[in-house]
Image (cartoon, grey):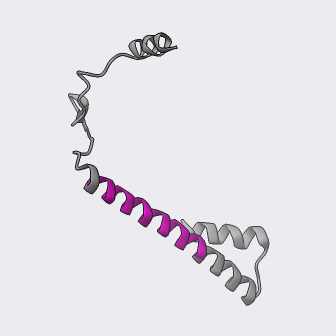
Amino acid sequence: MLQVLRQNLIEDHDIQSAAEFMLMDLALMAYYNTIKGQRMLGDLTTQIERELFRGDSLGVNLREKQGLIVNNFPANGVPSPSTNLQRLSLNR
């Protein structure tokens, strides 16, 4: 991905000198480090949420004959959307 982005930058901005290449590479490294930091932060957030709430994570499996199967999702007690709308209109 970064290699393709680098090639596009070289072509679009007609980069030819060593200084221009260094500046472009520094910008690409900053972009990569930002993306890497965001991923690390997201992973850390997920770990903290698992530790605090200790809930089983939602698992989704796709099987050939059975179709989409969702694990750890208690859908039996979930009210329908129309019930929620009725409750909202009654509370006003």
Which segment is the magenta one? 30-50
* Magenta stretch: helix, strand or loop mostly: helix
Determine whether 7 is above or below 80 in the image.
below
- Residue closest to the far bottom: 18
Residue at x 42%, y 12% (from the top left corner): 82
- Residue closest to the far right: 14
The picture quadrant where one finds residue 41 is bottom left
Q: Judge by depth and name the residue closer to the eye, 8 or 50.
A: 50
Query: On the picture, is 20 further left or further right than 25?
Result: right
Query: On the picture, is 82 further left or further right than 68?
Result: right
Quarter of the figure with the N terminus: bottom right
Residue at x 70%, y 82% (from the top left corner): 23
The image shows a total of numbered marks equal to 0
The picture quadrant where one finds residue 24 is bottom right
The picture quadrant where one finds residue 29 is bottom right
Query: On the picture, is 62 further left or further right than 91?
Result: left
Whether residue 43 appears in magenta in the rendering, the answer is yes
Q: Position of residue 51 (x, y in %)?
A: 26, 56
Q: Position of residue 58 (x, y in %)?
A: 27, 41
Whether residue 82 appears in magenta in the rendering, the answer is no
Q: Position of residue 74 (x, y in %)?
A: 23, 29
